[in-house]
Image: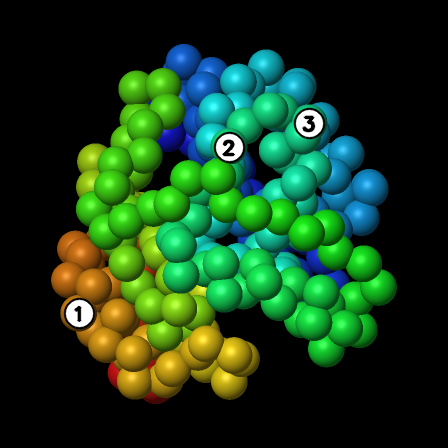
Amino acid sequence: MIQIASFVFSPFAENTYVLYDETQEAVVIDPGCYSSHERKILQNFIQEKQLKLVKLLNTHCHLDHVFGNEFIKQTFQVPSYAHANEDFNLDFLQVSAQMFGIAEVDNTRTDVYLKENDIISFGNSVLRVLFTPGHSPGHVVFYNAEQNFCINGDVLFRTSIGRTDLPGGHHQTLLNSIRNVMFALPDKTIIYTGHGEPTTIAFEKKHNPFL
């Protein structure tokens, strides 16, 4: 059974997730740890739980979701996974940092490109990759049908949706991703968001004012 640990990092209050199961194998999703203190928190958790980190997954590559990419890759010697279209964002990390007044961000590149319906395995567990562009060109989410949850990055929030005013964003594409991909998931699916508290598909179908 997959355990989900979450951490809120950086001035963007970004949600970083560590998923692990009874084998102690683990993946980290969207490591947004920016400061050395935040990185130590994440590292200590992994070490204290005696987890074997095997993969770094990015839902997308906006700077607040990749602050800790290089730290994780170098500390734990794991490859990073993201959609090829997210190279668009990685190419502009330094420009994005300047735009948001961030003094420094490590350049990082994706090691393995994800595609629609890829299966990500760790231990006895699997996540399915769903392609959900709109907030960014190569946004994906990670879905586990057995436990009815989805790590959804910045696609869907509790009573809100991802912003589309950043370069590469497109409002109608995002709405299509939510209606055609996210809302095709079972109503009971728990949505773990990139910012803020979790929600469910049923709740958003009923209460989300953008949809």
The residue carrying pointer 1 sits among few (fewer than 14), some (14 to 19) or many (20 or more) residues within 10 Å by Cα, namely few
The quadrant holding residue 25 is: top left
Residue type at mark 3 is Thr
Q: Secondary structure at mark 2?
A: loop
- Distance of mark 3 from mark 1, alpha carbons? 38 Å
Which one is nearer the viewer's eye here, 28 or 63? 63
The residue carrying pointer 2 sits among few (fewer than 14), some (14 to 19) or many (20 or more) residues within 10 Å by Cα, namely some
In the shown orientation, is residue 60 left or right of residue 145?
A: right
**Residue placed at 21% from the left, 36% from the top?**
146
- The spot of residue 121 in percent (x, y) is 32, 28
- The spot of residue 86 in percent (x, y) is 46, 60
- The spot of residue 105 in percent (x, y) is 74, 56
- The spot of residue 68 in percent (x, y) is 66, 45
- Distance of mark 3 from mark 2, alpha carbons? 11 Å
The quadrant holding residue 11 is: bottom right
Q: Secondary structure at mark 3?
A: helix
**Residue placed at 59% from the left, 19% from the top?**
49
Q: Secondary structure at mark 1?
A: helix
Residue type at mark 1 is Asn
Residue bearing the label numbered 3: 75
Which one is nearer the viewer's eye here, 197 or 105? 105
Vertical position of residue 56 compared to residue 85: above or below: above
How many numbered callouts?
3
Residue bearing the label numbered 1: 180
In the shown orientation, is residue 164 left or right of residue 101?
A: left
Residue type at mark 2 is Pro
**Quadrant into which the C terminus falls:** bottom left
Picture disc at residue 79: 2
The first of marks 3 and 1 along the sequence is 3
Which one is nearer the viewer's eye here, 190 or 180? 180
For marks 3 and 1, give the one nearer the viewer.
3
**Residue placed at 34% from the left, 46% from the top?**
114
